[in-house]
Structure formats: structure tokens, C-alpha cells
Image (cartoon, rainbow, N blue to C red):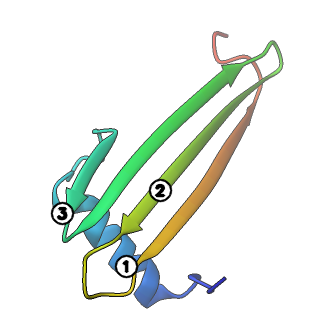
Amino acid sequence: MAKIANALTISEIERILYAKNPHYETRSSTAEGVECRRDLHRYSGQAYELTTEILQLRFAQSGQSPWKILIVSERWTAGSPLL
């Protein structure tokens, strides 16, 4: 598994994501031969809120090396969101 935590790789991922989806609103798109899929899950409890985002990028063009990236991010918020 390759490390992707460098500025150049992250900027390339962002460029692909925003190429056809500038406001990052659609759940799936294709840009520069890369299939992008985004899933968002939310849970609100009495004392916290959890948001999980799963981002999948897949590149599979003939004659090129295929690759796939799965990025999972989560955000926790303390307190009730309804208060």
C-alpha cells in the first residue's frame, strides 16, 4: 500500500475531485478517467453527532496501470445538534 500523505498527491486528488464537481455536491462523477464515488453517513445521538465520509477513486484505463484509493474521514461533534 502506497502512502498518499504528501502535498503533491493530495493536490492531484483534489484536482480530480473538483474537475467535474466544483462544489463537491454530486455522489459520483468521472474526471480524467478516474471514477469518483462519495458516500456520506450521519448519526445524531443525544450527546454527540458523527459524520463519516467514504471517498472511492478508481482508475482503470487500458494500457495504463490501474489503481484504487479509499479515503475514510470522520467528524465527531460533542453536544446535541438540535440544541
Which mark is first along the chain, 1 or 2? 1
Indicate which disc residue 19 carries: 3
Contact between labelled residues 1 and 3, with CB atoms less than 8 Å apart:
no
Q: What's under tag 3, amino acid-wise? A: Ala
Contact between labelled residues 3 and 2, with CB atoms less than 8 Å apart:
no
Q: x, y (%) of residue 33?
A: 22, 69
Q: What's under tag 2, amino acid-wise? A: Gln
Q: x, y (%) of residue 66?
A: 40, 79
The N terminus lies in quadrant: bottom right
Which mark is first along the chain, 1 or 3? 1
Callout 1: helix, strand or loop? helix
Callout 3: helix, strand or loop? helix
Callout 2: helix, strand or loop? strand
Report the number of numbered marks.
Answer: 3
Question: Residue at coordinates 35% horizontally, 71% vertically from top-left?
Answer: 59
Depicted 71 relative to depicted 68: above or below: above
Question: Residue at coordinates 47% horizontally, 56% vertically from top-left?
Answer: 56
Give the class, few, some or many, for how many residues have Cα within 10 Å of label 2's Cα (few <14, many ≥20).
some
Q: What's under tag 1, amino acid-wise? A: Ser
Depicted 13 relative to depicted 63: above or below: above
Contact between labelled residues 1 and 2, with CB atoms less than 8 Å apart:
no
Left/right of residue 1 with respect to residue 18 in the rendered view: right
The residue that disc 2 covers is 56
Closest to the observer, 7 or 17: 17
The residue that disc 1 covers is 11
Give the class, few, some or many, for how many residues have Cα within 10 Å of label 1's Cα (few <14, many ≥20).
few
The C terminus lies in quadrant: top right
Q: Quadrant of residue 72?
A: bottom right
Indicate which disc residue 35 carries: none
